[in-house]
Image (cartoon, helix red, strand yellow):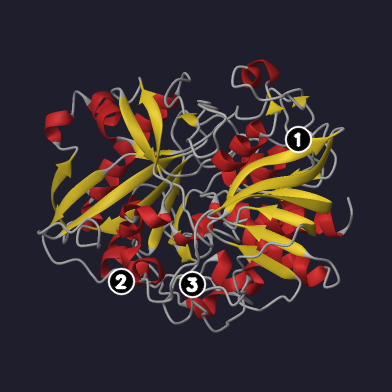
């Protein structure tokens, strides 16, 4: 039977009062010069700003964000139950779409990206998954010394010592689901972040405070005021100014016009897997031949900028329940299933992560009792691109995930879908399972087409400014942009190969470790 875990079971993680907005005041008058300029106040940028401001109290730091601060009264953000509604708020969302995806029935896929203080941490399902050790060890094997699992664990712990992590409690349905998984050879694991790389069912861990409010990198890491830190919201990045292969300044656009702000020490890009690649290209850093087509003066030829785009896909299974489902306080249901597809031979960890929801979840709102199992298919081999559509920074880049283009990816999706169908109808769920609604028996002989018509992004974007030592690497293992001094990228775009898990925790770890590299002067 499933055990019931509360937040007290999660180890030595700190408990702190939830502050549902940054205590750091936002400014309108930007000074002409700072020691460090951080571009993007998302999951990574808020951590980098806080770490540098604390380490260098005698230095000036500017944090730039295109969106606004998040109102403490915005229940859609702060109430975990309402997270699925956030993408409908265009004030908090960039509104990006993919190109037409030929392998997903020609659909354009909404590519959600958070806009505002906290970035995608105001926008996600609050799931906290470090990822398996095998994936990080693979980073090191690719030439990224110091990024193996044992080396990055202390930085995960630094994040967890400040951000409160709630470990979900069980309920009768989760207990039955745990038994269903056990029937299929999937054992119980009390803590997937401690006992990593295991096929298992486990209590989900969430960035949710002790008083049941969302935790964001803004509300947590910028909860204290730093006198040496300025935050400029509603400020668009136009470009980074590079002279003699040295990043010197940034050109920012605010309501009252453009401003050029110089940096004495470093400029740090923390705009995410879409935004960081976009900004580098606008600044002349990328494939010189492609940049010249937009009249952008090339600074240095880095053909890897915008390449290697990676993402996970999810598919949906829906089951009608014989009885009402238990209350769902976390957004997603409080359990997760990690599994392997039979064709997973990459050696990088589990490649299926099933999240669950009740049909009554806000944002779904089905009128009959029901439960959903969403297999997230991870470690996909397909690679996409982020490229320019214009030299105008207000015009979105072209995002082509190139989903299901690599051999084996569709087979992995089919296997994940079949696993979810098998779990959802297992005899251990006999008190709950009434019938399968999606995909339903009518799709039995057309499951590949079902995937093409319904699969969607897991919002696990990574890789467009990948870290490495090969010719397509954009940053070195110290996260400095190759060939350009005083410029780093510290966010999910540096991930060379995704790991088994969601990207939020890994991005926060990258921010903490990247900050330590800056502080150490490495």
Give the label, 3 or 2, closer to the camera: 3
Residue 111 image-quadrant placement: top left
Residue pictured at 41% horizontal, 31% vertical: 98
Where, quadrant-wise, is the N terminus in this rendering? bottom left
* Distance (Cα) linking label 1 and label 3: 33 Å
Residue 78 image-quadrant placement: bottom left
In this rendering, position of residue 183 left or right of residue 51: left
Q: Read off the residue under disc 3.
A: 166
| Marks 2 and 1, the one that precedes in the sequence | 1
Q: Read off the residue under disc 1.
A: 141
- Outermost residue toward the front in this view: 256
Q: Nearer the viewer, residue 249 or 308?
A: 249
Residue 311 coordinates in the image, percent (x, y): 49, 37
Total tally of numbered discs in the picture:
3
* Distance (Cα) linking label 2 and label 1: 41 Å
Residue pictured at 24% horizontal, 29% vertical: 450
Give the label, 2 or 1, closer to the camera: 1
Q: Callout 1: helix, strand or loop? A: helix
Residue pictured at 22% horizontal, 55% vertical: 364
Whether 469 is drawn above or below 122: the answer is: above
* Distance (Cα) linking label 3 and label 2: 16 Å
Q: Callout 3: helix, strand or loop? A: strand
Q: Read off the residue under disc 2.
A: 171
Residue pictured at 33% horizontal, 30% vertical: 108
Residue 78 shows in this picture: yes
């Amino acid at each position: 039977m499933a055990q019931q875990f509360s937040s007290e079971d999660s180890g030595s993680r700190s408990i702190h009062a939830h502050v549902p907005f940054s205590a750091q005041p936002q400014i309108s008058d930007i000074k002409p010069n700072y020691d460090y300029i951080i571009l993007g106040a998302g999951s990574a940028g808020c951590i980098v700003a806080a770490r540098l401001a604390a380490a260098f109290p005698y230095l000036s730091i500017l944090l730039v964000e295109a969106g606004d601060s998040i109102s403490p009264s915005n229940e859609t953000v702060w109430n975990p139950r309402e997270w699925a509604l956030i993408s409908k708020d265009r004030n908090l969302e960039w509104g990006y779409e993919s190109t037409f995806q030929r392998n997903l029935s020609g659909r354009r896929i909404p590519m959600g990206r958070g806009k505002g203080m906290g970035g995608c941490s105001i926008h996600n399902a609050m799931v906290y998954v470090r990822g398996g050790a095998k994936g990080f060890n693979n980073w090191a094997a690719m030439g990224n010394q110091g990024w193996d699992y044992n080396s990055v664990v202390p930085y995960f712990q630094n994040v967890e010592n400040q951000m409160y992590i709630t470990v979900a409690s069980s309920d009768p349905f989760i207990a039955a689901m745990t038994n269903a998984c056990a029937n299929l050879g999937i054992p119980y694991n009390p803590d997937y972040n401690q006992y990593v790389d295991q096929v298992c069912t486990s209590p989900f861990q969430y960035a949710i405070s002790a008083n049941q409010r969302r935790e964001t990198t803004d509300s947590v890491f910028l909860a204290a005021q730093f006198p040496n830190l300025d935050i400029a919201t509603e400020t668009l990045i136009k470009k980074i100014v590079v002279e003699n292969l040295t990043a010197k300044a940034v050109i920012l656009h605010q309501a009252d016009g453009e401003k050029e702000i110089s940096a004495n020490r470093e400029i740090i890009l923390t705009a995410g897997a879409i935004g960081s690649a976009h900004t580098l290209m606008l600044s002349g850093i990328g494939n010189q031949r492609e940049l010249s087509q937009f009249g952008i003066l090339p600074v240095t030829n880095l053909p890897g900028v915008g390449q290697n785009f990676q993402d996970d896909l999810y598919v949906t299974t829906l089951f009608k329940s014989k009885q009402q489902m238990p209350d769902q306080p976390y957004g997603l249901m409080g359990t997760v299933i990690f599994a392997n597809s039979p064709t997973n031979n990459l050696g990088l960890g589990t490649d299926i992560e099933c999240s669950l929801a009740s049909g009554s979840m806000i944002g779904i709102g089905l009128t009959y009792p029901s439960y959903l199992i969403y297999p997230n298919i991870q470690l996909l081999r397909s690679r996409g691109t982020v490229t320019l559509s214009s030299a105008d920074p207000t015009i979105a880049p072209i995002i082509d995930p190139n989903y299901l283009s690599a051999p084996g990816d569709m087979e992995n999706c089919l296997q994940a879908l079949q696993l979810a169908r098998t779990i959802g109808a297992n005899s251990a769920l006999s008190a709950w399972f009434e019938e399968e609604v999606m995909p339903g028996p009518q799709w039995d002989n057309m499951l590949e087409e079902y995937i093409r018509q319904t699969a969607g992004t897991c919002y696990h974007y990574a890789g467009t400014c990948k870290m490495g030592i090969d010719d397509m690497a954009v940053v070195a293992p110290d996260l400095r942009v190759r060939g350009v001094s005083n410029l780093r990228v510290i966010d999910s775009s540096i991930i060379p190969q995704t790991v088994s898990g969601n990207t939020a925790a890994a991005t926060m770890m990258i921010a903490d470790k990247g900050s330590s590299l800056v502080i150490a002067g490495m």
